DNA sequence: GTATACTGGTTGCGATTACAACGATTTGTG
DNA sequence: CACAAATCGTTGTAATCGCAACCAGTATAC
């Protein structure tokens, strides 16, 4: 799993650099393109990533002109993130990067095996989410 | 995959800390316990990790008294890494950590599904290894 | 209404990692 | 042999991430 993850990081970083985008923001922009107008806290929860990391990543995307942030009117603590037209124009490129990644990683897999792999990984991810608090804080758990 | 990997890192880091061992060295010590007397360069290759990272991790394990390093007599550039008795005494603890990890991650999986997941992940890891150089250096590839 | 607790976001800090440059050693070529 | 190229390990540097402390804004308790 570690090897695959490092492979993914290097691949996506190289492709993002090629597109002139922040190196580590691929998963985030991929997610934002379908879950628009989401709060940073929700993003942290979706990825199980520290909220500070999310804040910095979103800030970089904003610098790159890919997203805009606006304060939620009903709860002014919340900042909502929306993708810009510039980001939407990159959808074909981003799709291509994801397609090539899948081809590399799933090289030699039958369609059935691809589906199996995806289903099993999703269940592992669910387990990770379910046991997350156990790892982070054995007692006084917090909600997310 | 990213979520699962972060989950793994946090889980193993917490358990290693509990055992009084270097936080990020679980995969390495796990590997060393069955591939003893291996060079640092081979370790880097097995994990697809930068050799500098390997050097620092092994150095920490040495500080903790879990491994010893000796210069290969036939090729004095090479340092071979061997686990100490102290490390071998920790095998039951380390096994327990790995067992608990598998239970958490594979919660609700049937035996058949566990085997499927392992087989599919191993094939993905092979693909990662096979395509590694493509990502790192599209042209002038190096051997590892 | 006021004090207190909680929530979302930002920032400082330490730890980790990849990349690159380097030294020591070995191998290859003439 | 002599010199160039390659290999293994170490170290400097920059980027990234998790944790914790903090601030502004909101909800809860009294």
Image (cartoon, coloured by chain):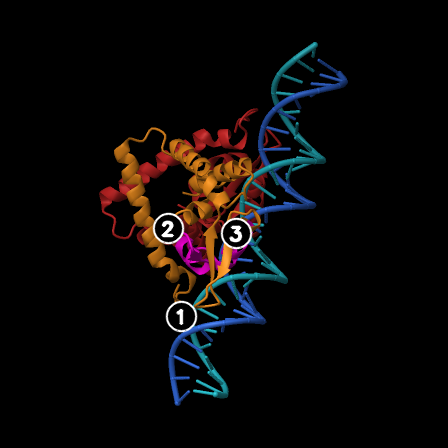
Chain colours: A red, B orange, C blue, D cyan
Q: Quick check: do tags 1 and 3 share a chain?
A: yes
The image quadrant that residue B115 belongs to is top left
Mark 2 and mark 1: Cα distance apart in space:
25 Å
At a point 43% along the width and 36% down the height, the residue shown is B92
For the residues labelled 1 and 3, say whether their Cβ atoms are less than 8 Å apart.
no
Numbered disc 1: secondary structure: loop
Q: Which mark is residue A98?
A: 2
Q: Closer to the observer: label 2 or label 1?
A: 1
User: Which chain letter goes with mark 3?
Assistant: B
Q: How far apart are marks 2 and 3 (CA)?
A: 32 Å
The residue singled out by tag 3 in the image is B57
Q: Position of A73 compared to B120: left or right?
A: right
C-beta proximity under 8 Å, tags 2 and 3? no
Q: Residues within 10 Å of mark 1 (few under 14, many from 20)?
A: few
Q: Is residue A14 above or below residue B104?
A: below
Question: Mark 1 vs mark 3: which is more N-terminal?
Answer: 3
Q: What stretch is highlighted in magenta?
A: B36-60
Q: Which mark is residue B140?
A: 1
């Amino acid at each position: 799993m570690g090897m695959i993850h490092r492979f993914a990081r290097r691949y996506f970083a190289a492709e993002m650099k090629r597109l002139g985008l922040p190196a580590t923001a691929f998963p985030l922009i991929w997610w934002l393109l379908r879950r628009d107008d989401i709060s940073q806290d929700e993003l942290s929860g979706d990825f199980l990533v520290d909220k500070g990391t999310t804040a910095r990543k979103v800030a970089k995307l904003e610098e790159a002109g890919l997203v805009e942030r606006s304060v939620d009117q009903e709860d002014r603590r919340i900042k909502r993130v929306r993708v810009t037209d510039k980001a939407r124009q990159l959808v074909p490129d981003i799709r291509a990067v994801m397609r090539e990644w899948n081809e590399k990683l799933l090289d030699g897999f039958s369609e059935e095996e691809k589906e199996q792999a995806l289903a099993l990984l999703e269940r592992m991810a669910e387990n990770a989410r379910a046991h997350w608090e156990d790892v982070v804080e054995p007692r006084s758990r917090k909600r997310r």
